[in-house]
Image (cartoon, grey):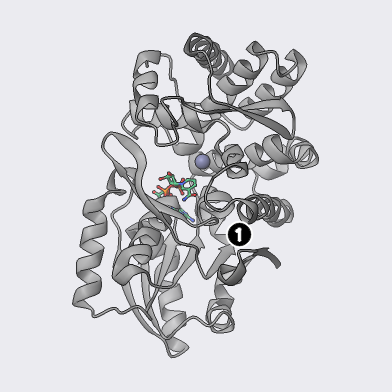
Amino acid sequence: VSDVRVELGDRSYDIVIGAGTLDEAPALLTRHQVGRRIFLASDPCVYELYGSDLEERLCRDGREVVHLLIPEGEKHKTLETVENLYTYLVAQRADRHSTLVAVGGGVTGDVGGFVAATYQRGMPFVQVPTTLLAQVDSSVGGKTGVNHKLAKNLIGAFHQPALVIVDTQTLASLPERQYQSGLYEVAKYGLIYDADFFRFFVDNLQAIIQRDPAVLEPMISRCCEIKAAVISIDEREQGLRQILNFGHTLGHALEAAVEYAGVTHGEAIAYGMLASLRLSRAMGLLDEATVDEVSAALLDIGSLPAAAGIPFGRLSDAMEHDKKRRDGHSHFVLLTEIGATLIQDDVDLALVAEAWQSAVVQAETATR
Ligand SMILES: NC(=O)c1ccc[n+]([C@@H]2O[C@H](COP(=O)([O-])OP(=O)(O)OC[C@H]3O[C@@H](n4cnc5c(N)ncnc54)[C@H](O)[C@@H]3O)[C@@H](O)[C@H]2O)c1
Ligand SMILES: [Zn+2]
């Protein structure tokens, strides 16, 4: 079991990572001063798989647990779902000392976190991420929120969890495509921050794809360490934290362009990263050999859904609504070498369009 500490003054917290950590959940909650009354949120599928066991275990430990079901899927990451949860909390007389425990993927974590951030101006919150993407990314860092129909994650709040429990055994039941999607975010950490970790990823890709328990814990821990290091320097995304958005300007635009259907978040940012590599090359920041090497590694993770039918205009429209725009400019995280980035605000849209097209062609060719 590894422990990664997120240093944020009096809001610091631990990420506990290992195989079977959920069995230790009651003791972990006690050690981290989580109160007796728990609202356990998950989607029906995850509740069935892990939530109900956890609920039982916590009840046996003398806690009072009420579970809340969040409908499954990105399309339910909405204010309507949030409102329904508030209603339930009011009906159950939840107060500011009750703890909301989100068990599931990034959707459950983001919705549950937003509810915890805002219900009675904030209640304690614990993340139990069960997708790879949530374990390496969304459960750490305190960003919570929901989508607006015009833009992703437009409504949100910062609310750090009190504890994150990662049980790597939960990944065993994750569908292949969801697991792969998380791997794109894993690769991202190496690319933006840690060349050695990127090498580890490439060298162990087969074991990683097979979910070999021997590589899961070190891999997830390193991702959490990197994210923790970045957010303890820049919690509110004033500067450094922006590097975590590598591939995300275009990735989020793609998700919005297809209305969050048919492409997972990880797949969308895989496209975004492929295009950003080419954009970095076109702007003279990155050499061709690195573009080829990194693109090949990303495409080795698995095949991507076709994106050729989506006109670039739909993406550029979506980018206009991106909340990360500043003074009318979308920012792009570019790569200067493996492990090093540069943030650029005034990128020529024609270059972006070109980079996008060639990324789409490249993904298509790799899939054939
Ligand atoms: N807050 C942040 O900092 C942050 C960062 C990255 C992504 N996100 C958000 O995370 C969301 C994507 O998260 P996601 O990829 O986890 O998707 P998700 O939450 O939709 O989960 C994907 C699917 O996997 C199922 N599932 C979850 N755990 C499982 C398990 N162990 N076994 C079998 N099935 C399981 C779920 O029921 C769901 O159908 C997006 O909304 C994205 O915006 C947030
Ligand atoms: Zn992401």
Q: Residue at x 43, y 73 (%)?
A: 124
Q: Position of residue 290 (x, y in %)?
A: 75, 21
How many labels, in total? 1
Q: Tell me: 120 left or right of 28.
A: left
Q: Quadrant of residue 206?
A: top right
Residue at 26% x, 37% y is 149
As drawn, the residue found furthest toward the front would be 327
Residue at which label 1 appears: 168
Query: In the figure, is residue 8 to the left or right of 190?
Result: left
- Name the residue at the bottom extreme: 62
Does the rendering let one see residue 303? no
Amino acid type, residue under disc 1 in the picture: Thr
Classify residue 103 as left or right of residue 151: right
Q: Position of residue 242 (x, y in %)?
A: 57, 39
Question: Which residue is nearer to you in this view: 83 or 336?
Answer: 336
Q: Residues within 10 Å of mark 1 (few under 14, many from 20)?
A: many
Q: Quadrant of residue 159?
A: bottom left
Q: Is residue 309 above or below residue 88?
A: above
Residue in the picture at 60% in, 59% down: 168
Q: Quadrant of the C terminus?
A: top right
User: Is disc 1 placed on a helix, strand or loop?
Assistant: helix
Tell me if residue 322 comes above or below residue 147 in the rendering.
above
